Image (spheres, rainbow, N blue to C red):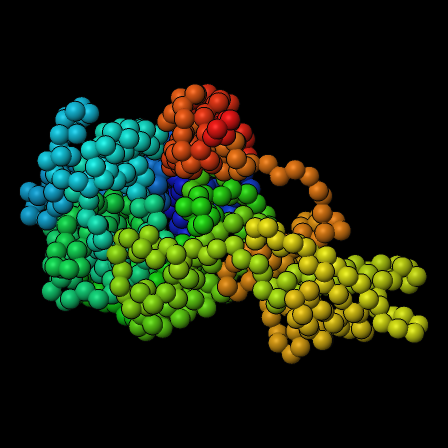
Amino acid sequence: MPTLVRKILIANRGEIACRIIGTARRLGIATVAVYSEADRHARHVAAADEAILVGPAPAGKSYLDGAKIIAAAKYAKADAVHPGYGFLAENADFAEACAGAGLVFVGPSPASIRAMGDKARAKALMAEAGVPIVPGYFGDDQRAGRLAEEASRIGYPVLVKPSAGGGGKGMKIAASTEDFSTALDSAKREAAASFGDDRVMLEKYLAAPRHVEVQVFGDGHGTIVHLFDRDCSIQRRHQKILEEAPAPGLSDELRKAMRAAAIAAARSVAYIGAGTIEFLVTPADGAFYFLEMNTRLQVEHPVTEMITGLDLVAWQIRVAEGARLPLAQDEITAAGHAIEARIYAEDPARDFLPRTGSLERVAFPPASPDVRVDSGVGAGDEISIHYDPLVAKVIAHGEDRPSALRRLGHALGETRILGVETNLGFLRRVLAHAAFLEARLDTSFIERHSAALVAEAKPAAAEVLALAVLGLLCERDAEARSSAMLDPWNARDAWRLNEAAEETIHVRDATAQEAHAEAIRVVHTPGAWSLALADGTQYFRSSGALAADGTLRVDLDGHRVEALWMRSGPEIRLATREGEQHRFLVQSLEARGPHGGGQTGRLTAPMPGRIAAFLVAPGAEVAANTPVLVLEAMKMEHMLRAPSAGIVREFTFSLGDQVAEGALLVTFDPDGA
């Protein structure tokens, strides 16, 4: 008998929680959010009809605690639980516990989750169903010696992957026998930390495949359909950052074969709900291999929604209620092309190291039928060490791929973020790269083109420097007007009895290395300023206005420019249309002092995290760039290397300790000391 869902608890946070709440509200379903102490003021909490605290900041004590989530659902008298993606979304025990508590689990059956959640078992199932798989080892014997033997049999390079994993977490490449032990140990540690299961499987490493996936949907009445394909080849750290639908450049025959294989895969486990079958495609011969099935909604589902016009969350709820799929396969159509860009708080120049901190200023493009922004954060929110550093997803649709690319590029240009560092500029460079424009895609795209995609820290252009100073002048002008309203004698405007007011502002570009302070001469005239930069650049008439949200609009000799601007003490931050953040220090206000971290003889933490492993011992002689320890942060392992040649003197923390960003971790005696 069909179940009518009237109240749904979202067992997740961030943008996916906000996205599910939006559909539930449209369907007339009441919503309950859960939150950790770190998310007390989060957007998904404010968006829901009710919200319940489920524990402290660490996910293991809040969002991953199934018993607390179910207790919250029962307390709120919810009918159903939607897990979103990540956290408990692919946890069969949790799905089973929901059913045991009389709650509708908006997702597949526990049996389907178990069958596909164990990646090694899923490979065997797919082989039985006639779906092509990558050569590898998927056995239960997890002895290091047996795994090493299997790696040699498969042939290097091999990929070491957590059996219970997903999202690229814990995946390690071993190029040779010498690398295998290190890769295996690291994969097992990360698998245990992320999934509570350190079992691994081995696969032949395909050097430059495409990553193509097929969206499938099943109901409880035996119907399984596909909703076309997506390309997710643009990845860093085995995690996607750009996705598009449909996958460009595939032959009709290949699409047909992959879609048929995807439906066969879903049918082999009697799949119900939204799922994704992921394949690796080798462009040279057009062969494809089953990679894994994600038994949940994917992060990139909006591109499928944009080309089909369907709401996949609404379909999930409908199927969970026991209804049939609303459309048959021949009734599902696709129009145009859609591309999604994931904006992360990370530093592309430092191997995409996740960043934490406050989003001081945020500006997204306005929503339209062809541009969509999915985000769970805004100005003033924190990007925390405890959760994924995703800031937002910007999705654009066009009648074809070039028009979708153009719209997405424009939308990213309208997206400006100040505070925590992001990959926004990097994404814009990928979109503009000739190989991407020509759809020459594979999973090694970023690595192969890194020299062109990762921007070096260069001195700010004259126009950017002028914007930084004009923001300061606009801010001072507004303060002066406010002061003058109270007492005209306090006015700090440009009026002089016989001549124009002049001043020199000393500004140092803090983004570029070894930058010197520039002396910028400012001449105040009524309603405008004249700027003369040290390099000879002059702007003879400049004016501007600074809005309360930090939007800076200026006119430089007839050229209107817009940026996002903010000041904190002596520091000025500026975000331009190119997606880059710039930092400047006003020299007269700059607090001088020693600069820590990164100098020869010391290794400091680049971000908050936990000491996961020591790779050398005190007293070891190391060369520059030698791996010395592993820092675990944001559910991933980060290899920290010696800053120079020398002898390891001391580790200042113990294994398992939590460390703060900038904390001194290792001291060295320089080479020859």
Residue 410 lies left or right of residue 505; in this view the side is left
Residue in view at x 13 percent, y 30 percent: 149
Residue 510, position as x, y percentages in the image: 61, 51
Q: Nearer the viewer, residue 431 or 444?
A: 444
Is residue 27 something one can see in this rendering?
no
Residue 501, position as x, y percentages in the image: 84, 68
Residue in view at x 8 percent, y 43 percent: 127
Residue farthest along the bottom direction in this orientation? 558
Residue 427, position as x, y percentages in the image: 42, 58
Residue 582, picture quadrant:
bottom right
Residue 499 lies left or right of residue 462; in this view the side is right
Residue 254, picture quadrant:
bottom left
Q: Nearer the viewer, residue 673 or 318?
A: 673
Residue in view at x 71 percent, y 69 percent: 532
Residue 351, position as x, y percentages in the image: 41, 46
Q: Is residue 407 above or below residue 203?
A: below
Residue in view at x 66 percent, y 71 percent: 537
Indicate the quadrant containing the N terminus: top left, top right, bottom left or bottom right: top left
Residue 78, picture quadrant:
top left
Is residue 483 something one can see in this rendering?
yes
Q: Nearer the viewer, residue 617 or 305?
A: 617
Total marks shown come to 0
